[in-house]
Amino acid sequence: MSLRISLAVTLAAALLISFFALIFWRPAAALAALAFALAGASLARLLWRGAAAAGASESGAASPGEQATQTTQSSKSAARATAAEVVPAGELIETIMNSMREGMLVVDADLRVVASNAAARVLFGFGEGGATAAAGRQPPRLGELTRNSGVLSAYLDAIARGERVDVKVELADAERHVFDLRVAPLQRREGGTHTAAHGAVGVFFDITRLERLERVRQEFLSNVSHELRTPLTAIRTFVETLESGALEDADNNRRFLSIIDRNAARMHSLIDDILELSAIEAGTQAVEARPVRLHPMIDDVLTALAARAAECRIALRNEVAEDVVVHADARRLEQMLANLCDNAIKFSGEGGTVTVAHERAGGRDRISVSDTGEGIAPAHIPRIFERFYRVDRARSRALGGTGLGLAIVKHLARAHGGEATVRSIPGEGSTFTIELPHTPTMSNERGAMKDE
């Protein structure tokens, strides 16, 4: 009798997992379900043969030849059954389910949770050691695990209609998570037709990262379109003005041409920065760290920006010791410093000071660029390195910024195995810091971008 029960359990589990794979088609889940179905079928066949051999041996009188054959078959069946017991069916099911990254909840017709895997128990905070498990011996109801109307409605609709339900739900505790929830009814087949659903199985596919990446992509396209539209509109407006007769206006035609040239240069700079940032994020730009003398490099950067600083009466100070050597890609480090110093000059305010300094602590080099401007409000600090993010959009555009300089700095710093940070006090200025490892240990930029 116990063998028949084991046979029935094994076959039912194999069919359930195969059915689950067909409904929730994912490569990993399908392969796992197929493997389990094959293993379950093998176990069922072994158990069936063992049961048949045992029944034959108990049937009573048999000829000597038949007894010998039965003995041989019983021995083989016993050996196979012993081998099959190495991985019991229950443990196999549990291992497969708990190895899934997706959460799975199985409920009965009363929405009482009758089965779940480890991912679901972590997601909803119940099970062994959970608060819900301690409340009593009865399995928890789905409504006790979540009050999310989308989750509850999906299970109720699947049971009531006897059809699969796909919805997108958002669950929030400490963090916001978005899931693609697929719920399928559990039905018995009698006489070639399905009976009313007596439960449902639901799988929670976490698509939080995909949602965030899609949102970043949409924001990026929107920002690019907006940034390109502004100078393009100005160019077309002044070209039409010149064509309408202003070309013969000696007092204004050169001014119009100057505006066109300035906006064209802005578009060119924006496109260059977009291509540069895309190449860095894609990991196609090699970063080779070598010993670099920092003081003369900063002198070169400040000299290139001296004319612009002089227009605003801004003092440039290089406080880096002459013997300081850092490990970095010289061209990329100069690009980062130029971006930070250029920003510092733009936002220091007339008569201010821009200071570049260096310190070494904990085996890392910290190169800081400080200004004496208005500073940055705390609310803007977490987003200051995002693409196209500006504290003051109108002022930034008037000063010629593309909104990508700080994003480039951050990604280049990470490509070096370091980081870019900012510290600011409103009314007292800001300090941007490039932190680099003192040894030439590199990080893969593609890997660094995984959680961006």
Image (cartoon, rainbow, N blue to C red):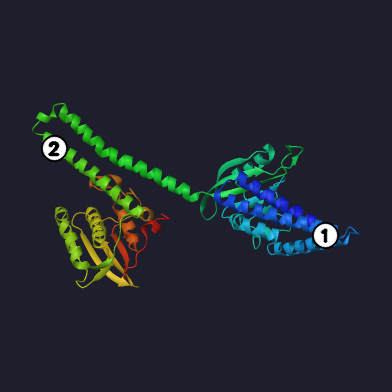
Residue for badge 2? 255
Three-letter amino acid code of the residue under disc 2: Arg
Image spot of residue 316 (x, y percent): 18, 61
Secondary structure under tag 2 reads helix
The answer to which of 353 and 36 lies nearer the viewer is 36
Q: Nearer the viewer, residue 433 or 81?
A: 81
Residue located at (76% from left, 52% from top)? 8
The residue lying furthest to the top in this view is: 244
Q: Quadrant of the N terminus?
A: bottom right
* Pointer 1 residue: 54
Q: Which mark is residue 421?
A: none
Q: Earlier in the sequence, mark 1 or mark 2?
A: 1
Rendered residue at 85%/61% (across/down): 65
x, y (%) of residue 354? 22, 60
Tell me which residue sits at (29%, 63%) in the image: 288
Q: Nearer the viewer, residue 443 or 178?
A: 443
Residue 177, how many percent across, how many down?
Answer: 52, 51
